[in-house]
Structures are given as structure tokens and as C-alpha cells.
Amino acid sequence: MTSIQQGVPNFDRYRALGLSTFAFTLCFAVWTIFSIIGIQIKDDFNLSDTQLGLLMATPILTGSISRLFLGIWTDRFGGRWVLGLLMLTTAACVYLLTFATSYEMLLVGALGVGLAGGAFIVGVTYTASWFDTKQQGTALGIFGAGNVGSAVTNFGAPFLLIALGWVGTAQVYAAVLAVMGLVFILFAKEDPLTQQRRAQPQLSFMTQMAPLAELRVWRFSLYYFFVFGAFVALALWLPHYLMEVYDLSIKEAGFIAALYTIPASLFRILGGWMSDRYGARRVMYWTFIASAICTFMLSYPSTEYIVQGVHGEIRFQFEINLAAFVVLTFVLGFFMSLGKAAVFKHIPVYYPKNVGAVGGVVGMIGGLGGFLLPLTFGMLNDVIGVWQSVFMLLFAITSISLLWMHFSIRQAERIELRSEIEQTDLPEFSTPDHYTLDDWRPEDPSFWEQTGKKIAKRNLWISIPNLFLAFAVWTIWSILVVKMPQLGFGYSSNQLFWLAALPALSGATLRIFYSFMVPIFGGRRWTAISTASLLIPCVWIGFAIQNPETPYIVMLILALLCGFGGGNFSSSMANISFFYPQKEKGAALGMNAGLGNLGVSGMQLLAPLVIAASVFGPLGGDPLVVQQGTLQGTELWLQNAAFLWVPFIAIAAIAAWFGMNDISSAKASFSDQAVIFKRSHNWIMSVLYLGTFGSFIGFAAGFPLLSGMLFPEVDPTKYAFLGPLVGALARPVGGVLADKLGGARVTFWNFLLMIAGVLGVIHFLPLGENVGSFAGFFIAFLVLFIATGIGNGSTFRMVPVIFLNQRKRVLGDTDLAVKEGNKESAAVIGFISAFAAYGGFFIPKSYGTSIALTGGVAGALYTFVGFYVVCTLITWWFYSRKHAPNPC
């Protein structure tokens, strides 16, 4: 306890706890309001289960994401004003919701309602500052019991709904929350650490976010994804589930759902006390074991068995009746409440100065569970048709969490025994010594030939299939959007181009962050983790794409999630660049990127084949039927385009974890790498790489859909893979040519070839009565793909040469210059990869915009020509002319 906390009267301390707990209870009641009013809204607006699931989940999304920023603001400004103003703002949003007249307006209103969920992290930060570490577990457990607000909604809202309708119910909630916001501002006091924070220098955003680089923060987040995210999801879903499965009325369903939410909230106080007394680790064991048992039993659907006996058939039935269901959900809620308290017991202990930022991230991930799970519940119902699939999913999540936690604890115990020290941070992601390269000198010829080359090649050949899969997942929508209109998905051309373009947008943005991850986390760990993350969009798309009624916004979310694949490229290239000497970087990076880029053509080649047959049998789901065109009546398993990659992703991630290495000398903080933003050549090379790689990924994403629109008589899925294939195969050629002839010279002539390729495409376009020529159009695009591949390899060869020469000019020809040059070039490679990936968004969107404005794509193509002319001039002026300032 700080001296400031010691001087706080107990009355003030308990008043702060009481006010914040009551405020959070009301906020939580508002946050889960759609669990009750959504039932009437579903009937009024004629919504499907998936649409209802999305409506219930949307507030959870806003509440989750806002926690990160609200936590930081609370660290800076204190909880009194942040929480008070948050409640007033949310009350206004709830009131405005009542004016919605369409499903889209409901979703927008639900985003505003979701701000109520952000109150959690504000209250945690505010409450924790009043108590010392020995009391924080209990205090935060009491505060967290405000989750009982969901029980208030489940128990009380049905009566309001019957009496006032959903509009009147929402207006009552808005009024009550507004009053509480004013009460909190007037009667709550500033927390005792507010003045201390104000007296200290303001920390930068990056300083506040620095703890997020520690993997234990993300481990806590996974635990909270289940104990809190699943709690919120079930609080939203149970009334609907009980009404459908057990044929209850809305009042009966709300009452029974409250029997789940009350223990899942109030016993959080007990969980905080037990975490203080017995330790959070032990409480988490109890939580996951009990939850696994409960969700397994709840996941068993009503089943009738027929046994062929001696004297004929013997029939019997097994099902979870209502009484058993109530008991199991009560027990599940009880242990979830213990787990919620145990997770947040860690945060003020490990991060006393960053409770807001760290707690915000953990709370955000947990809240995202409350967003994603109800949405997934609805899709599982629509696709699988088994109500108990809800608990099957939760059983899988809790089992994985239990196994991971047990593994991490055993790993920690082994380190404790070996080192004879107490290990407070479970190092399940720590790199064993035999995976870490402490002595790595690729520029030393003897070291390279005797030791380095073999290790570097092993890491390269494991990296390539991981990157291949990343590109395959990243571009999956380029095939899906071609087939969706034929299968009953009623999306416009512009909406389809959005689906094709959005993975590039999110992937490009993620690359900005991924580019700095390897020096922070290590190449081995980050490759394995980032590859495993590809399972999320693949599995989810596999279910969602089976139902043509899936809302378009769900498809947009899934398209954004495919950006995980795009983000992997920058970290993969940065990682491989550390392993090779300067003279071989071009070829190595060309191999990694070029063969990795084959994932695009692999997707576009294999996806059309696997969707034509029931490759996975009953496990793969039912097909959709083509409703128009020459193939009308044909069955297609569109989900196979996503399910195909799931086993390969799992294998590749395991191979990376056990087969790759981390280089200790490649460690660097974000601030160390951020120096590249001051280097002018970082920005110049970003423009050039946008011209090469941005064109490659943009053409690959847009070519199938564009070809099908311009030449309707041609099936583009038969040819689409060839362009990315030749582009990917040309990339190593570009790297080799750049090693021999110079990267700038190859890049200069390559941009001229790209200009010629675009002009060729324009020449063969259909225009007016001229039907155009698909053969000429396709050949011109192949020239473009080849040129983008060569340019990708040559520009990447330019980067390490430019930055090594820059460092040598400052530090001389020293080992330090080589080390810093390698770090900077690795960061630049990652960053320009991120910048260039936006081409994958702008090119398909340029097609759609050009068609919408002019009726054709020629306008977009002429814009590309102008940009390539600019790239040609930049390359010549800075790098390839006779007296260029930085020849490379």
C-alpha cells in the first residue's frame, strides 16, 4: 500500500467501492439489454437466428474495443469523470436506439449501447487505486459482482417488455443510467492516485502500451476470453435457448437465465477472496476442470438409442432435462465467477502502474469473446441445426485453455526446480536454449559455411510453407466472391469487390504491427503463433459460407479476419532477413516471398477443385445448389475452400514451433526499430514496393471477379491461378537478377515493363460494340504478374544495401554498423510490406469505383499507368542514374 493509500479513510474507500459497483451493475444491465428486448425485436423485424446473434453481439464489440482506450484515459484522468461521462453518453445512445426503423439502424444503435461495457475497465482502475495488493482481489471481486446486472435484465426486463414493449423498456433503461451518471459525478471522489498521476510527467501512448509486448498479458486474455466472454455470451443466449429447447415463456426463460447469471456474478466476490488466500493459479485449475465437465454434459443432444438385442430392438433415450440443465448451468456460472476474479487478481500485482492499459486489453479480449460467441452460436444453429452445438464449442474452448495452462505451469515448475528460484511469470512461451542462437555471424565466411548456412536453410524451408498458407487464407475471398452470386448470396457487384478488397486492407494494417514483432517476440515464436491464428477465419468461414442468409456484415467481419494471413508476410520476411549474409539476402528473401506468394495461386487452383466435391464427407456440411447459369442445379461445397487449409495450418504451426530458431542478437524494442520512420528511404521504398507488391496482390485479388464481369462467357476460376503463379515464380528471379545486376537497375526497367503491360490490358478491353479479347487481356495480365514478381524481388534486394550503406557512412565498416543495418533493414522490409499491401485493397476497389462512375475499368487502369511512371522516375533519380545519391 502506498503512503497515499494508507491515509485514505475507510469510509471513502468503501463508498468508492459501493458507488463503482452499483454503477457497473447498471452498465452491465444495459450492456446485455438485447438478451431480452432482442426477442421482441426479432419478431418485429423478422430476423434470422444469425441476425439476432449479430444484434446481441454488436454491443459487446463496442464495449470490448472501447475498454482499451477507456483504460488508458482512466490511467491519465481518473475514474470519476470518465465513468460518469461514459454513463451519460451511453444513456443517450440507448434512448436514440428507440428511433430505429430498420435492421441496419438497430446495429448502429447497438454500437452506441455497447459503450456501457467499457465501464468495467474504468471501474477496475478506479477501484484498484483505493486498496492495497492484499485487498485488491477481494475488492475487485466485489466490484466485478456488478456482472449481476445481466441477471437484473434477465429477471426484470421481461416484465417491462410485456408492459411497455421493447421501446419503452429501452427508454426506462436510458433514464436510470443517466441518473446514475449524474450521481456518480456528484458524489464519487477522485481516487487517491489521481493527484499523483497528474504531478508526474505524462507517459506517451507507447510507454503505456509497452507491457502489452509481454506474452503473459495475452495468456491472461485467453483465460478471460472464456470465463468472461462465454459468460456474457450465455447471458445473452440462454433466454432464447430456453424458449426454443424447453418451450418456456419469456418470463420463465428470463428467470432461469438469472439462476445462471446471479452465481456467475455474485460469487466473483468469493473468487477474489479465494485468489487472495489460495492463489489465482489454483482457482483457475478449479475453474477450467469444472467448466470442462459441465460443458461436456450440456453439449450432449437429446439422443435416441436403438440396440439390436437378442429378442429384438431395445430403445432408450438420453437427454438433459430442464432440472439438470438448471443445475449444470448454475455450477458452470459459479466456477466462471471464480475464474473471472482470479484472472484480474494478477493484473494490479504484475502491472501496478499500467492497470488501465493491461486490464483494458485483457478486458477487451474477454469482451470480444462475448461478441464472437453469440454470433457463432447463431451461425452454428443455422448451419448445423443442433442447439447443443453452443456447449460443444464452449467445451472445446475450455479444454484447450486447461491444457495450455497446465503445460505452462509444468514448464514454470521445471524452471523453478532447475534454477532454485520462484518463477512468478509462467514462461510457457520462453524459448529453450537449444532454440536460441546466441552466436550468429552470417557475414563471417567460415562461420557461414560451417554452421550458419545449414541453420538458415532449415528456417527458410519451414518459413516458406507457413507463408504459403498465409497467402492462401489472405486471398480466399478472390474465389468465394466469384461463386457466391450463383449460390443465392444477394450481394451487389460493389459489395463483392468490398469482400475481395477488405482482407488486403486489414492485412496491410496488421503488417504495420507484425513488422516489429520478430525482434520483440522472436522469429520462431511469432511464426508459429501467427500461423496458428489463421485457423480462426478458416473455421469460421467454413460455417458461415454454408448459409446464403448470413448477414453481409458477418461476411465483412470474416473478410477482415483474413487479414491475419496478410500480416504474416512482413514478420516472415523480417525474420528471414536476419539469417542470411548481405550477398545472399536477395535470393533468400526472393525464395521466401516468391514461394510463399504461391499460396495465392495455390488457393485459386485448389479451391475450385475442392468445392466441386464432398471432400470432407458429413464433417464438411451440406452443399449449396447453383441457382443460375449453365451449371444450374450443380451442388457446390463452397466451405471446402476454407476447411481445406485447416490441417495444413496446424501442421505448419507445430513445425515452426519445434523446428525454427530465435536469434538473440536480433532482439530490439519498438523504440529501437521506430527510428526507421525518420529515414527518408523508408518512405521512398514504401512507394516503390507499393508499385510492385501492391500491384501483385491487388491484381490477384481482383482478377477473377473482374474477368468474370468483363467476359461473362469465360469461367475465370479455371485460369485465375496462373497469374499469381507466374508472379510468385518470377520473384526469386528478380532477387537473383538484383544480386547480379543491382536492384535499382532491375527495378527501373521493370516499371517500364509494367507500364507496357497495363497498356496491353487496356487495348484488349471490351468497349461498346467491340467485345474485346480475353486471350489478349489474359496474356497482358500475365506480363503484369511476371513484372510484379521480378519487381518484388529487386526492391527487397535494394533495402538491405541502402540501409547497410547508410549505417556504414555513420559508423564506419564495423560490426556495429552491420548489426544496426540489419535491424533497420528488417524493420523497413516489414514496414514497406505493410504499406504496399494496401494495394490489395485499392486496386479491387478502384475497379468497383471506376465501374460505378464510368461504366468501365479503363479509368482505373490509366491511373495505374500514371503511378508506374512516377515510380520509374523515383527509381531513376534516387538509385539508378549515373550519380545517384544512393546507388544500389
Image: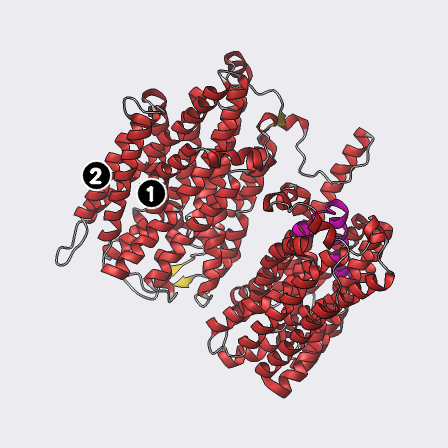
Element type at mark 2: helix
Tag 2 residue: 756
Residue 359 visible here: yes
Q: Residue furthest left?
A: 769
Q: Earlier in the sequence, mark 2 or mark 1?
A: 1
Residue lying at 44% horizontally and 47% vertically, measured from the top left: 474
Q: Hey, which quadrant is residue 366 in on the image?
A: bottom right
Amino acid on which the number 2 mark rests in the picture = Ala
Q: Position of residue 582 (x, y in %)?
A: 45, 21
- Up the image or down, 625 lies above or below 834; here it is below
Residue lying at 67% horizontally and 30% vertically, measured from the top left: 432
Q: Position of residue 33 (x, y in %)?
A: 63, 73
Using residue 334 as the reference point, say whether residue 656 is left or right of it: left
Density class for disc 1 (Cα within 10 Å; few <14, some 14-19, many ≥20) is many
Quadrant for the C terminus in the image = top left
Using residue 71 as the reference point, say whether residue 132 is left or right of it: right
Q: Hey, which quadrant is residue 848 in on the image?
A: bottom left
- Up the image or down, 685 lies above or below 392; here it is above
Amino acid on which the number 1 mark rests in the picture = Ser
- Per the rendered image, the range of residues in magenta is 335-360
Element type at mark 1: helix
Report the disc number at residue 455: none
Density class for disc 2 (Cα within 10 Å; few <14, some 14-19, many ≥20) is some
- Up the image or down, 123 lies above or below 409; here it is below
Tag 1 residue: 695
- Up the image or down, 420 lies above or below 105; here it is above
Using residue 848 as the reference point, say whether residue 564 is left or right of it: right
Closer to the camera in the image, 636 or 599: 599
Q: Is residue 13 a member of the stretch shown in magenta?
A: no
Q: Position of residue 420 (x, y in %)?
A: 83, 30
Closer to the camera in the image, 408 or 485: 408
